[in-house]
Image: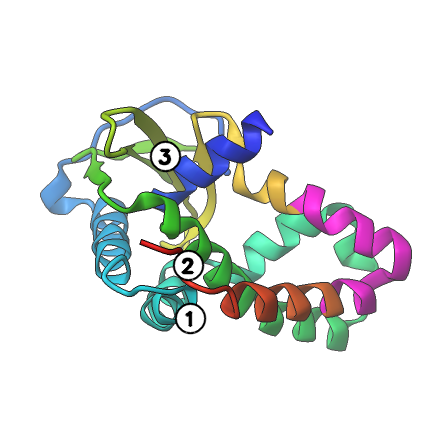
Amino acid sequence: MRNRREMLRAGAAAVLLAGSAVPVRAADDPAVALVEALVATFQEALKQPDVRGRASVLAEPLARSFDLPAMLRLAIGTRWKDIPADKQAALTEAFGPYLTATYATRLAAAAGSTFAVQPKSEARGPGRLVQSTVTDRSGDPSPVDYVIGPDGKITDVFLQGTVSEAGTLRTGFSEPLKEGGPDALLAHLRKSTETMLAASPPKP
């Protein structure tokens, strides 16, 4: 339960690494610019009263900012190579709306929060790491770190410094994959997306 609460709070901003840290000036740093633009989209989505409205704001920016195929491969793990190409494609297509609905749901916990992005990224392996902080309305800060891959898109997000987005997804995907393989996971993605989008807005 503790990890779940941390995911909801820290994931609202997101709302996952070896190498030495090499600072880059923010003005010349496309990784920082990418995260700043994404955070601005989160803030815009917060103006919407329900999950479906927030998802409509988030869908295109998330698809543009995240390397969805790479995230899905990380989330499925070694089983990915055993999935036929047509089913890989179907899973990737369903994963985008699922991730969008997930972030739109998490943002419900972010009302009144403030977002701050560090002006310098750091080298992490072949990519970059961009650190940010979400401070909730009570003043409690939560770190949210974005991993930017060599292609300039987000491949993972670390919440509270240690909780990997891909790792959390892997935990959630393991049961349907074990029970029914890629077909069961595809059904899980689609059903979960529908359920999240149909959620009623919280009462004032």
Identify the amino acid type marked 1: Arg
In the image, what residue type sits under mark 2? Ala
Residue where numbered disc 1 is placed: 52
Residue at the limit of the structure toward the front, as seen here: 204
Q: Which residue is mark 2?
A: 104
* Residue 116 on image: x %, y %: 19, 36
Q: Could you tell which of marks 1 and 3 lies nearer the N-terminus?
A: 1
- Characterize the magenta stretch by its predominant secondary structure: helix
Mark 1 to mark 3: distance in Å?
24 Å
Q: What sort of colour scheme is used for the picture?
A: rainbow
Above or below, 50 against 116 in this view is below
Q: CA distance from mark 3 to mark 2?
A: 16 Å
Give the residue type that dot 3 points to: Val
CB-based contact (under 8 Å), mark 3 and mark 2:
no
Q: Is residue 96 visible?
A: no
Question: Is 192 contained in the magenta span?
Answer: no
Who's the residue at 50% across and 38% down the image? 16
Please give the range of residues in magenta: 170-186
Neighbours of disc 1 within 10 Å: few (<14), some (14-19), many (20+)? many
Is 26 positioned to the left or the right of 50 in the image? Answer: left
- Residue at image mark 3: 144
The earlier-in-sequence mark between 3 and 2 is 2
The answer to whether 118 is drawn above or below residue 39 in the figure is: above
Q: Secondary structure at mark 3?
A: strand
